[in-house]
Image (spheres, rainbow, N blue to C red):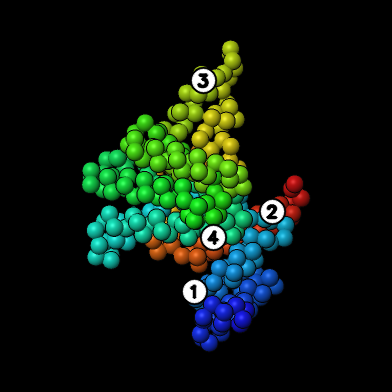
């Protein structure tokens, strides 16, 4: 660890902090929750190699099935963050886009296969024309960037999928989406679902309509048949849904998929959402799974 820190030009204080972080990571394998919570309180900036060790300690706990397979984010608070910084409300969205790239790297390092994000709701079209145009311009820039080999989405080997009503999206943005989908289609290990021009009610109505159209004869529609036509039908079940900014509501996002998911509402706005907030959500998730596992063992359930 010392050699790693010195090689990366870190000072003696950083080396001490890094060693302390490693100590708590090791301790977490023996006294998991105590060691990890102490590390969270330190709030030090860690190099990626140490972040990966922390995520490994969190997600590879014996008997709990490995890392979550599917995690979703409502990226709330961009405008509130900007206003608190004395900026225009629209200035928060670029900062939120940068945060997304970091979060995708954390998800990859944690071994999460599918990430679904709420990028733009159908309801968002009701916002001011200036803000909608700003978001569309930013979205186009991000999709164009995904076509570049050096983009983090490419480096993390995410396959892009767009979920939502594409007819409402401006043509130039749709064209950028299509290029990004084509540029990432060869990735098969991980999936990034971008919910754009999306609401859960619209998704469920679309799924129900498709199920009715495809049913045979007097076939009775059931939950399984409708689920087959959801936008996320090819993905694993949703394990965790995170909404930043502390608002305890889902805003018409993945209502069907989140019925049995762990819901987390950290107080940080999306631009302020940190690695430590991310790990804390994972700890909550595994804590609840561990408790359910103990209860199942106690009651001799499968």
Residue that numbered label 4 is attached to: 106
Give the image location of residue 226, x and y in percent: 54, 28
| Contact check, label 1 and label 3, Cβ < 8 Å | no
**Closest to the observer, 184 or 267:** 184
Within 10 angstroms of label 4, few (less than 14), some, or many (20 or more) residues? Answer: many
Q: Is residue 64 above or below residue 250?
A: below
User: Horizontally, is 173 left or right of 180 in the view?
Assistant: left
Q: Quadrant of the N terminus?
A: bottom right
Residue farthest to the right?
Answer: 300
| Contact check, label 1 and label 2, Cβ < 8 Å | no
Q: Element at badge 4?
A: helix
Q: Element at badge 2?
A: loop
* Spatial separation of the CA atoms under disc 1 and disc 2: 29 Å
Q: Earlier in the sequence, mark 1 or mark 2?
A: 1
Q: Is residue 17 above or below residue 209?
A: below
Residue that numbered label 2 is attached to: 65
Q: Earlier in the sequence, mark 4 or mark 1?
A: 1
Q: Earlier in the sequence, mark 4 or mark 2?
A: 2
């Amino acid at each position: 660890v010392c050699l790693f820190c010195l090689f990366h030009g870190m000072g003696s204080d950083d080396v001490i902090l890094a060693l302390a972080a490693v100590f708590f990571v090791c301790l977490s394998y023996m006294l998991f929750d105590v060691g990890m919570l102490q590390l969270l309180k330190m709030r030090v900036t860690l190099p990626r190699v140490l972040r990966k060790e922390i995520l490994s300690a969190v997600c590879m706990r014996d008997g709990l099935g490995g890392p979550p397979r599917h995690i979703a984010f409502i990226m709330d608070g961009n405008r509130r963050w900007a206003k608190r910084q004395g900026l225009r409300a629209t200035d928060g969205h670029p900062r939120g886009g940068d945060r997304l790239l970091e979060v995708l790297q954390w998800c990859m390092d944690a071994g999460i296969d599918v990430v679904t994000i709420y990028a733009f709701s159908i309801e968002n079209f009701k916002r001011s024309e200036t803000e909608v145009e700003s978001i569309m311009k930013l979205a186009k820039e991000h999709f164009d960037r995904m076509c570049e080999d050096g983009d983090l989405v490419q480096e993390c080997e995410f396959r892009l999928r767009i979920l939502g009503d594409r007819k409402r999206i401006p043509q130039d943005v749709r064209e950028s989406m299509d290029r990004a989908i084509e540029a990432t289609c060869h990735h098969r290990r991980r999936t990034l679902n971008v919910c754009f021009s999306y609401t859960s009610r619209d998704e469920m109505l679309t799924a129900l309509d498709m199920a009715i159209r495809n049913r045979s004869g007097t076939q009775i529609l059931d939950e399984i048949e409708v689920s087959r036509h959801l936008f996320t039908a090819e993905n694993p079940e949703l394990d965790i849904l995170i909404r930043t900014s502390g608002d305890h509501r889902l805003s018409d996002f993945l209502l069907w998929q989140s019925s049995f998911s762990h819901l987390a509402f950290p107080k940080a706005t999306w631009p302020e959402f940190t690695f430590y907030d991310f790990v804390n959500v994972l700890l909550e998730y595994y804590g609840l799974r561990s408790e359910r596992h103990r209860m199942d063992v106690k009651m001799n359930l499968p």
